[in-house]
Image: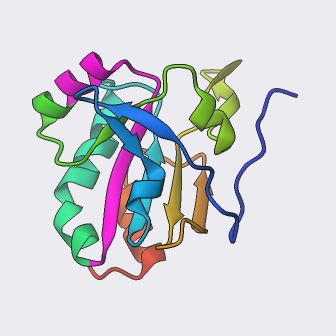
Amino acid sequence: MTDYPRLALGDTAPDFTLLDQDGQPVHLADLRGGKVILYFYPAAMTPGCTTQACDFRDNIASLASAGYTVIGISKDAPGKLKKFQERDHLPFPLLSDEDLAVHQAYGAYGEKNNYGKIILGTLRSTVVLDENGVVTLPWYNVKATGHVASLRKKLGIDS
C-alpha cells in the first residue's frame, strides 16, 4: 500500500519546518495561538492549483477576519513558489516540501487516478487546525474549483 495514514478529527498536527517562497523557514509551532488552514496542492502555476490559490486569495479577508491563517504547501522549490506568488498576487505563505515528508505525515500523498492511470502524487487536501494545533477539519481529495466556498460553509464563515 502506498497511501500514508490520514489525519483524523482531534489528532495533533505533526510539527514541521519548511522553507517559504522567500527561502525563509516557517515553523508550524510558531503559529500556535491562531487557527491555521493548511492546503496541499500538486503543482504551482497549473490550472487547477491556480484556481484554488486565487480562490483562497479572493477570500483571504473573510478567512483572516474569522481568525484563520492560510498556508499553501506543495513539492515545488521556493523559487517556483515565489514566481507563483508574484504572478497571482497571493497574500499568504507558500511552503516548499520537496522531499514530501510533510505531505506524507499529513496523509496528503498517495495513489490517485490521473486520467485513468493510477499514479503516486499529491492528494489535494486541506487540514484545518485550532489554536492548539489540533485537527478540527481533515479534508482529503478536494476539488480545486469551489473548494474555498465549501470550506467557508464547513467553518461557518458567512460569505
Colour theme: rainbow
Image-quadrant location for residue 7: bottom right
Can residue 101 be seen here? The reply is yes
Residue 81: in magenta span: yes
Left or right of 19 on screen, residue 64: left
Q: Quadrant of the C terminus?
A: bottom left
Task: Look at the picture and state if 117 lies above or below 142.
Answer: above
Left or right of 42 on screen, residue 22: left
Count of all numbered marks drawn on residues in the image: 0
Q: Residue 71, image x and y in percent?
A: 36, 49
Q: Residue 50, image x and y in percent?
A: 28, 35
Left or right of 88 on screen, residue 100: right
Name the residue: 61% across, 60% down.
138
Q: Residue furthest right?
A: 1
Image-quadrant location for residue 2: top right
Please tell me which residue lies in front, 55 or 92. 92
Residue 123: in magenta span: no
Q: Residue 19, image x and y in percent?
A: 37, 30
Q: Quadrant of the N terminus?
A: top right
Q: Residue 28, image x and y in percent?
A: 46, 51
Name the residue: 60% across, 68% down.
134
Name the residue: 59% across, 35% down.
103
Q: Which residues are magenta?
A: 66-84
Task: Look at the picture and state if 12 lies above or below 75.
Answer: below
Please tell me which residue lies in front, 158 or 89. 89
Name the residue: 61% across, 57% down.
13
Can residue 117 be seen here? The reply is no
